[in-house]
Image (tube, rainbow, N blue to C red):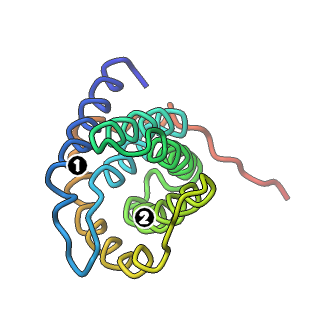
Amino acid sequence: MTIADGFKAAALLFVAAIAQVSIFSQLRVYGGVPQVVLVTLVGVALLRGAVAGAIAGFFAGLVVDTAMLGQLGLTSLVLTVSGYWIGRYGETTGRDRGHAPFLSVAVVTFLYAFGILLVTFMLGERAPAGPEMRSLLPTIVMNLVLTAPVYALVRILLRPRERADYATEVQLLG
């Protein structure tokens, strides 16, 4: 990732985090809340790989945690792991596929909700899973609706690298 791409990704995630905290956190449909930060992170991680995804996830989570005055590091930890694994998926199989952003958003929305509950529970705090899991399906649907426009914007700002920069695929002999 070049320095210019890093600044673009940071600015994009900063704006997404501020929009998440100020606008999207107030928007509830059947209990679900759209997570524009998570969808933006999927775009950055798919296009730039695991390391960039982990760094972007940590940065976005830190901005969200700071803006919400919540438990500092909770969202950062879960988004760092999410960004890394989305980036690995993009590096190995999914980068050029049309369904990759949608599949990544659906899976990571579920894993993000589960990860937040798990880390909260491990910290010894009360973590009621019922309301979170009941609102999971509407959240996944809203995130999937956001995926196409957000991924298109991320793809415009962070143009995909040429095929020569990608990791070469392994072909089995025999």
Depth check, front residue: 1 or 14: 14
N-term-proximal mark, 1 vs 2:
1
Q: Where is residue 102, by image quadrant?
A: bottom left
**Image coordinates for residue 151, horizontal then vertical, percent:** 28, 52
Q: Residues within 10 Å of mark 1 (few under 14, many from 20)?
A: some
Q: Which mark is residue 21?
A: 1
Kindly report the distance in space between the C-alpha atoms of the residues bearing marks 1 and 2.
17 Å
Residue reaching furthest to the right: 174
Give the image quarter of residue 13.
Answer: top left
What type is the residue that disc 2 sits on?
Thr
Q: Position of residue 26 (x, y in %)?
A: 17, 61
Quadrant position of the C terminus in the picture: bottom right
Residue at image point 63% right, 56% down: 122
Q: Quadrant of the N terminus?
A: top left
Pick the residue in front: 113 or 171. 113
* Residue 109: mark: 2
At 46% from the left and 41% from the top, the residue drawn is: 76
Q: Quadrant of residue 136?
A: bottom left
Q: Residue furthest front?
A: 125
Position of 7 compared to 23: left or right? right
Question: Is 40 above or below relative to 163?
Answer: below
Which of pointers 1 and 2 indicates the residue nearer the eye? 1
Q: Nearer the viewer, residue 173 or 140?
A: 140
State the SS at label 1.
helix
